[in-house]
Structures are given as structure tokens and as C-alpha cells.
Amino acid sequence: MKKIVIAIDGHSSCGKSTMAKQLAREVGYIYVDSGAMYRAVTLYAQRHHLFLPDDSVDAEGLHREMPNIRVNFRLDPATNLPLTYLGEECVEEAIRSIEVSRQVSPVAALPFVREAMTQLQQQMGETKGIVMDGRDIGTAVFPDAELKIFVTASAEVRARRRYDELQAKGMPASYDDILRNVQERDYIDTHRALNPLRQADDALVLDNSHLTREEQSQWLLERFHEAVQ
Ligand code: DC
């Protein structure tokens, strides 16, 4: 069976990574969470005081630091899933905080950050057999991907899911704050100048507001088998 690249794009918190991980496991592909890479850069910027008091990014300072920001993935031997690292440190949990979620969009809008992450992502896809999720995977990173999925769900459904996720991990969260964050990120992600979130012309749309996990995974597997034929 030929190996393909699967690009999964869509709004934040619509379950892209859960579905991408599951699909990768089912078909034996590598899973890459491209959002985690932008989150890791944001965490680095926070730790190095590269946010100004008005919450904007010190772009010049971050640009200077880029050679020192070594985002990489290592397989978790227990789950066989990639964990996000900043240099030698596993930051998988730290990058999921509401603080990182709040400040990641302006970082992801910086051209030099996108360029560096896109290059890393393209290297990871060179040998195919990869499922990557994000915002611009089917449009900018892998415009020739054999299978492109564009996922969406209502902002309320997405905020509820993220709230439940944080609660389950015992992390403090407010539903209203999360909803506001989801809406703000939708706006920034779809309006930024460089590679905004948009549906690729050849992407298949999946609105999962009212789908069960099983229905969704069945649908994805069918699309996968059509694409590899
Ligand atoms: O999917 P996520 O919520 O972890 O993504 C974090 C942020 O990174 C979000 O604001 C959008 C941005 N992002 C991006 O600009 N391009 C990608 N390919 C993936 C994420």
C-alpha cells in the first residue's frame, strides 16, 4: 500500500489532535502536532520575558533567540506517541496551559516563526506515512498532501471540550475565559496575513459538533482507504 501525507487542519479545540493521533495509530503512521511547536516557541518566549506588558511579543528579541529554540519530538515509550521537547526538556504538559493558549496566536503570526516551523514540518514529512494537524498543513506545509481534512465544530462545543480536558487534568479553568480564548484565536488564526487558517480547495470538510468519536473515526478510515487506493 502506498504511503501518503495526511493533513488535518481546522479551528482550535475541535478535536483535531485526538482524531489525528487515533488515525495515525490505526494506520501505523507517525503523528505530528504542529500546534505544539508554536506552543513550545511561546513557552520559550514566556520564560525569556519576551512578552511586553501589553501582551504583544518582543519580535526582535524572539527573532534573535530563534537559533536557541530547539523544538523536537521524542516518542513516549509507554504510549508510542510523540512528546514535545524544548531542547532536552519535555514540555508536553507546560505547553497546554491556558497561559500558553492565551499568548500563542501572536507568536504563530510572526513570519520568521512560521518559516522555521514550516521547514521543520516539511522535513518530518519527507518520507510520508505521516498525519500532521494544524492550521496551514494542507495549504502551506503540504499543499500536495494526498488526503486533506478540514475539521470544524461550533465555538461553544469546542470551549466545553477544552474546559473538560483541563478539569480532567486538575488544571484550573473557567468556561467563559476559554470560550473567549477560542473566539479570539479563531479570529487571529483566520485573519493573520501569513498562511491564515482556511480550507484548502481540495480538503474534505468534517463538522464534528454532533458526531461521536466512533462515527468520526469510521468516516476518517473510509477517506484514508479511498486515498491510498
Ligand atoms: O492547535 P493548537 O491550539 O495547539 O495551536 C496552537 C496555536 O498555534 C494556535 O493559535 C494556532 C497556531 N497554529 C498555527 O498557526 N499553525 C499551525 N500549523 C498549527 C497551529
Image: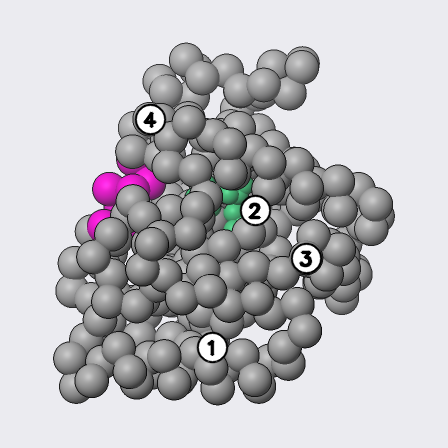
Compare marks 2 and 1 and give the one earlier in the sequence: 1
Find the magenta span and give its range.
116-122
Identify the image quadrant of residue 52. Answer: top right
Q: Do residues under tags 1 and 3 come within 8 Å of each other at their CB atoms?
A: no
Residue 70 is situated, as x and y percent measured from the top left of the image, at: 34, 40
Task: Give the residue at mark 3.
Answer: 154
State whether label 1 is within 8 Å of ligand 1.
no
Q: Given the image, on which type of amino acid does mark 3 rest?
A: Ser
Crowdedness near tag 4: few (<14), some (14–19) or many (≥20) residues, C-alpha within 10 Å: some
The residue under the point 30% across, 68% down is 147
Say if residue 46 shows up in the picture. yes
Instruction: Determine whether, in the image, residue 97 is placed left or right of residue 131.
Output: right
Of marks 4 and 2, the one in the foreground: 4
Q: Secondary structure at mark 3?
A: loop
The residue under the point 35% across, 18% down is 64
Q: CA distance from mark 2 to mark 1?
A: 21 Å
Number of the label disc, if any, that sits on residue 22: 1
Crowdedness near tag 3: few (<14), some (14–19) or many (≥20) residues, C-alpha within 10 Å: some
Number of the label disc, if any, that sits on residue 227: none
Number of the label disc, if any, that sits on residue 95: 2
Q: CA distance from mark 4 to mark 2?
A: 20 Å
Task: Give the residue at mark 4.
Answer: 112
